[in-house]
Amino acid sequence: MGKLLFVDIDGTLTEAGTNVPPESAVKAIKGAQENGHKVFLCTGRNYDMLKPLLKYGFDGMVASSGAYVSCGETILFDHPMDEKDLHLALDSLHKNGVYCTIEGKDGSFGDMELKDFLSESEGGNSELIRWRKALSSNLGIRPIEEYDGEPIYKIVTMARKVEQFDECRRLLEDRFHFVIQDVLAHGCVNGELVGNTFDKGMGCRMIADYLGCGMEDTIGFGDSMNDLEMIETVGLSVCMDNGSPELKKHADRIAPAVSEDGLSRMFSDLGLI
């Protein structure tokens, strides 16, 4: 068996907030597969938001930050949030002025004020840019008032100050990871709340175990701090040059930026194509 390649979407496979990879990346993925390797999406996006990319022929996915994992047609892990924890978190976050988007498998629901909040925040990392573009394009994100009770896998959060998460952290830190992106000078702290019984790294390991592949034969490609567990788990880790300065400290290799055919060039450098 060849290598197992785990690829983040926003800021790694595509420009943040888009669904169209560079043609060089599409060719690299196909070329790697033709050489006996398998390529998986490994993303914070839920299934609904990554669906436009499935036409490129991935071998499976680690979605919703590890809460939903599949290999081929086989679902290996499916772990939505407990409903009581969901409402406890939302009540606390909203009380402290944190804007939220909740993600189910087939749809997302967000605070409608979030669009205005993001328009007032300049710059940002790939996750912040993705949400700004998603909301401005109205990509299927419905008002949170229309939430109909479907299983939710994670909460995406936006706030002005990290202290706004303190109460929710005290209430739920024994059961959830509070993933906070690098705090940059763009007036916004963004992150996500995900269960602590899984993460992207565990999802990668599930797929490797299912296929009987050792972790030394896995490679992960990411750009932001919600890729950290993947970067720490795979045999060889790669951070994009456009990525988080903090994540780069943990990566084995730095690839050129996504806008400079970084994925394709790194696949070539690693002998995958």
Image (cartoon, rainbow, N blue to C red):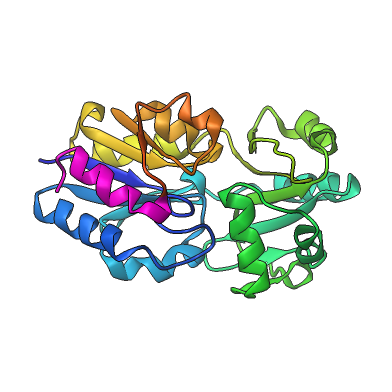
Can the viewer see residue 94? yes
Q: Which residue is nearer to you in this view: 140 or 162?
A: 162
Q: Which residue is nearer to you in this view: 144 or 224?
A: 224
In the depicted structure, whether residue 241 falls above or below residue 262: above
Q: Quadrant of residue 266?
A: top left
Q: Is residue 10 left or right of residue 272?
A: right
Q: Count how many numbered circles sit on residues in the image.
A: 0
Point out residue 121 in the picture as x, y percentages from the top left corner: 77, 54
Q: Which residue lies at the image location 70% right of the left edge and 38% below the top edge?
A: 184
Q: Is residue 64 left or right of residue 13?
A: right
Q: Residue furthest front?
A: 260
- Is residue 272 one of those drawn in magenta? yes
**The N terminus appears in which quarter of the rendering?**
top left
Can the viewer see residue 70? no
Q: Which residue lies at the image location 49% right of the left edge and 37% below the top edge?
A: 199
Q: Which residue lies at the image location 50% right of the left edge and 45% below the top edge?
A: 65
Report the magenta residues as a range: 258-273
Q: Which residue is nearer to you in this view: 206 or 22?
A: 22
- Is residue 116 one of those drawn in magenta? no
Point out residue 17 in the picture as x, y percentages from the top left corner: 54, 62
In the depicted structure, whether residue 55 falls above or below residue 246: below
Point out residue 259 in the picture as x, y percentages from the top left corner: 42, 55
Q: Is residue 270 left or right of residue 139?
A: left
Point out residue 116 in the picture as x, y percentages from the top left corner: 81, 65
User: What secondary structure is the stretch in magenta mostly built from?
Assistant: helix
Q: Which residue lies at the image location 43% right of the left edge and 58% below the top edge?
A: 14
